[in-house]
Amino acid sequence: MRCTRCLLRLLGRTGCPAARYELRTAPLSKPSVLHQHPQHQALRHLHGSTSLAKNEPRPARFVGSEDKSKDSSLVAQDDLFERVAKDIKTKATFNQVIEVFNKRDIRRRGHVEFIYAALKKMPEFGVERDLAVYNKLLDVFPKEVFVPRNYIQRMFNHYPRQQECGVQLLEQMENYGIMPNMETKVLLVQIFGEKSHPMRKFQRIMYWFPKFKHANPFPVPHQLPEDPVDLARFSLTRIANDLDAKVTVFQMPCTDVTESGTEVTLPHIVGIQSPSQMELLAKHNPKRPVFVEGPFPLWLRKTCVYYYVLRADPTPPEERVEEPYDPERCFDYPLQLDLDLDRDFGDDESFDVEDLDEGQVFAICMTNQGDQATLNQWISGLQQNNPILGQVPTLFRLDAGPRELQGEAGDSESGGGGESRKEEPEPRDEAEAEVTDVEEPRRSHRMKQ
């Protein structure tokens, strides 16, 4: 009797499904009796434990299902941009898409997906550097909904998905160099509160941006010149970094018609040379050749231009002549200092300095067609101010440049470059030719670095 009673109690405590099912199916009117005994007791109805309710089966979720739903929502927001702004993608149409989304639902459902899609579409509409558009995107967030009410909510990152979206918007502003204003701060306080991650990101931007705003002594404008001649002039001035250097346009881009009736497009040739480079070239040994090397890339933001240099090999040690410094050449930055200072015995004057002489650069040029005929025109133009070039042999070391610099073979042959200057002279003997071929990869690699 006791064993049976203990067994039933144990089944009721553990919440066995079979026992619960049998006991619930028993009639409620007649109590069930184990044995016909004078001291029989009616069994009480057993209730299942709460653990059964917690372990009820749930629908299975596959890994990455949330990401798929997020991607589908982003696709839907991209369709909204495509429907509203079909053909014309300007700032007005971008603002119109934001207004359409704001008026579609007063609760702003799906605002996070919409902001992510808008951030991705901003470069297509040309508004990636517009502060007013970023503030308008921040205005899409509902106000005073994601503000934490107590320190516990603030500690556990209240509404993390929305805060992450706000931080992503500020990071895109930071990447494009856009400094927030007071309107941005007011919007962030209304949306997320003063103690939130987007507000901390705003404070970091406002601390560091003024410090690095004028840190670059050679800033590059956001809008580069569209004219290739003006772009080449700006690039050469930036490379030379010499106020005395003179930029010369040897040839303007134009289209010429030959006697046979074919049109020939002549490339532009822009060069730069400083007076000090002219002096070095005048002192160059005519028996040693000069080299035209290139193209070498120069990146100006997202635009890549290429330039060519006229240089010489390093001067041999036996031919070097050390000239005394002119003390009146520069008063602000003297080239030599003679200081008689007392030195201690612990001062070590023996230190190694690696002196790497890469040769002298005499001139730089830019052209959109880097073949030998075009560069011959540049050398011919330099010969007017540097007559020694008529006595010095010129060798061309041209790498396989980009397609826009190569041009067609017919254009390069009919450009008239070979008429202004004869072809490159051959080396005097075979030994010099072999040395030149061996040293070419080393020098080219050094210049590219």
Image (cartoon, rainbow, N blue to C red):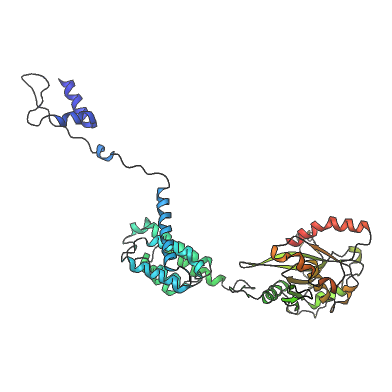
Residue extending furthest toward the front: 260
Q: Is residue 100 left or right of residue 249?
A: left
Give residue 25's position: percent from left, percent from top. Answer: 15, 30
Residue 173 in sight from this viewpoint? no
Q: How many marks?
A: 0
Image vertical order of residue 266 relative to residue 12, above or below: below
Give residue 67's position: percent from left, percent from top. Answer: 42, 51
Residue 8 in sight from this viewpoint? yes
Q: Residue 294 versus residue 55: which sits nearer the camera?
A: 294
Give residue 182's position: percent from left, percent from top. Answer: 43, 74
Image vertical order of residue 26 relative to residue 282, above or below: above
Quarter of image, res 136: bottom left
- Which residue does the image show at 25% across and 37% down from the upper left? 52
Dividing the image into 4 quarters, which one contains the N terminus?
A: top left
- Which residue does the image show at 80% across and 68% down from the upper left? 413
Q: Residue 112 versus residue 38: which sits nearer the camera?
A: 112
- Which residue does the image show at 37% across and 44% down from the upper left? 61
Quarter of image, res 309: bottom right
Q: Is residue 379 left or right of residue 52?
A: right
Dividing the image into 4 quarters, which one contains the C terminus?
A: bottom right
Quarter of image, res 307: bottom right
Q: Residue 404 versus residue 47: which sits nearer the camera?
A: 404
- Which residue does the image show at 33% across and 69% down from the upper left? 103
